[in-house]
Amino acid sequence: GGSPLNDVALSSITMERVSGVTFSHLVTSRLLLRSHLRRLVRSLHGIHSQKPPEGSPAASESKVSIKELCANYASKVSKRIAKHAGLYSSLGDDSGIDTKKMAKVVLDFMEEFEANERP
């Protein structure tokens, strides 16, 4: 007999690092626009709702909803803000950016996106 794992098909996702300007750089340079954030959330939704090949094990998995996507990332952003509050405050002081207000804007945006967007 073979290993039970040999009989189980596994789903996988391949991510790739893309060269370019980071959102952190855009934020600290005061260049992050609402349209950029909207594009980021739409791209994340696209990644999370990618349709797998018909008949693959992943094809039977449930799809992520806008609500689940926003709740997932809002939770991660909230935790990151809490964990690194001192760093963000220091960066804000150095650059003249109100990081507490920025965090609120990002979280409010996710709530608005969830409430108003259609996939």
Image (spheres, helix red, strand yellow):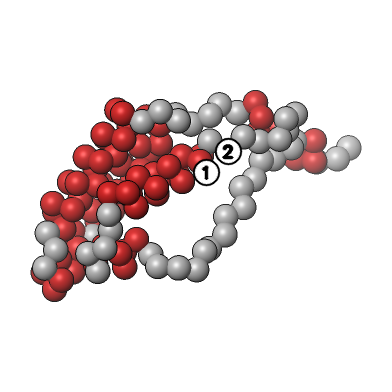
Frontmost residue, 87 versus 70: 70
- Give residue 55's quadrant in the image: top right
What amino acid is at disc 1?
Ile
Asked if the residue under mark 1 is in contact with the one under mark 2, i.e. CB atoms within 8 Å, the reply is yes
Looking at the image, is 68 positioned above or below residue 16? Answer: above
Crowdedness near tag 2: few (<14), some (14–19) or many (≥20) residues, C-alpha within 10 Å: few
Residue 16 left/right relative to 68:
right
Residue 16 left/right relative to 39:
right
Circle 1 sits on which residue?
Answer: 47
At 25% from the left and 41% from the top, the residue drawn is 109
At 26% from the left and 34% from the top, the residue drawn is 112
Residue most extreme to the bottom? 94
At 31% from the left and 28% from the top, the residue drawn is 116
Frontmost residue, 77 versus 96: 96
Residue 67 left/right relative to 95:
right
Crowdedness near tag 1: few (<14), some (14–19) or many (≥20) residues, C-alpha within 10 Å: few
Circle 2 sits on which residue?
Answer: 50
The answer to whether residue 79 is seen in the rendering is: no
Q: Position of residue 113 (x, y in %)?
A: 31, 35
Q: Position of residue 71 (x, y in %)?
A: 34, 35
Q: Secondary structure at mark 2?
A: loop
Q: CA distance from mark 2 to mark 1?
A: 5 Å
